């Protein structure tokens, strides 16, 4: 049995609305200006504190961390209800579960992964492991989350599936096949620059690629 590592936000679930709401509520709470959706969305996939630092470079890291605490609280208590699985993802994962072990690795915290998957109605039994950015030293595009999944499950990953260039870079650095999915905010052209092994329109197309 092989191991597939999946990104979560905008790969398995449509998460844009939840994060747009959480970031701008957190900015408002901290007396910062609202940020246009497109300026946020193009940065999604990066570690949250790096997104905030890029948008407000004059802020101290203490303030950045405070904003991310507020963002986390809003996701957990309010905006997670906005998150929905992409069409066909649940049935596809059920099919893959018969032949593969499935890990979810995300630049969100472990508790957010659990809350989002539960809110989106996923069967927890589908997943062999969940790995968040708070459980590794370096988040994607570093391969630490993939390596942790391999260590915890005592098996080498075969694939990394995600919607951003950071997922593809992490997969390449981990020495696994990288599969880009076009359900996020990174265009085909952006993803192609990182030379993924495959590009698919959605997770529904994954079984055809895996054979």
Image: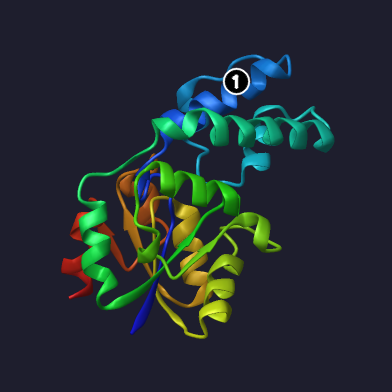
Query: From what the image shows, is residue 186 above or below residue 150?
Result: above
- Asked where in the image residue 84 lies, by quadrant, the reply is top left
Q: Secondary structure at mark 1?
A: helix
Q: Position of residue 143 (x, y in %)?
A: 57, 68
Q: Which residue is rendered at x = 56% and y = 31% of the image?
A: 77
Residue 56 in sight in this render = yes
Viewport quadrant of the N terminus:
bottom left
Residue wearing tag 1 = 25
- Give the number of marks: 1
Q: Which residue is rendered at x = 66% and y = 61% of the image?
A: 135
Report the side of 7 relative to 22 (left or right): left
Q: Nearer the viewer, residue 207 or 171?
A: 207
Q: Nearer the viewer, residue 13 or 35?
A: 13
Q: Position of residue 205 (x, y in %)?
A: 19, 59
Q: Position of residue 34 (x, y in %)?
A: 59, 16
Q: Which residue is rendered at x = 66% and y = 42% of the image?
A: 50
- Asked where in the image residue 124 lies, by quadrant, the reply is bottom left
Mark 1 Cα within 10 Å, few/some/many (few <14, many 20+)?
some
Residue 9 in sight in this render = no
- Asked where in the image residue 96 lies, by quadrant, the reply is bottom left
Report the side of 33 relative to 193 (left or right): right
Q: Position of residue 204 (x, y in %)?
A: 20, 56
- According to the image, what is the colour scheme of the structure? rainbow
Viewport quadrant of the C terminus:
bottom left
């Amino acid at each position: 049995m092989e191991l597939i590592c999946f990104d979560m936000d905008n790969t398995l679930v449509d998460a844009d609305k939840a994060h747009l709401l959480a970031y701008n509520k957190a900015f408002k709470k901290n007396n910062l200006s609202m940020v246009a959706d497109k300026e946020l969305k193009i940065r999604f996939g990066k570690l949250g504190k790096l997104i905030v630092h890029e948008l407000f470079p004059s802020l101290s890291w203490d303030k950045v961390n405070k904003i991310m605490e507020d963002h986390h609280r809003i996701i957990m208590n309010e905006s997670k209800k906005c998150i929905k699985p992409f069409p066909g993802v649940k049935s596809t994962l059920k099919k893959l579960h018969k032949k593969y072990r499935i890990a979810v690795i995300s630049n969100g915290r472990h508790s957010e992964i659990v809350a989002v998957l539960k809110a989106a109605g996923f069967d927890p039994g589908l997943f062999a492991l969940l790995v968040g950015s708070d459980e590794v030293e370096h988040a994607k595009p570093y391969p630490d989350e993939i390596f942790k999944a391999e260590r915890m499950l005592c098996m080498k990953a075969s694939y990394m599936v995600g919607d951003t260039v950071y997922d593809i870079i992490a997969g390449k650095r981990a020495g696994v096949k990288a599969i880009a999915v076009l359900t996020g905010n990174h265009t085909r052209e952006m993803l192609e620059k990182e030379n993924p092994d495959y590009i698919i329109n959605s997770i529904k197309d994954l079984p055809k690629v895996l054979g």
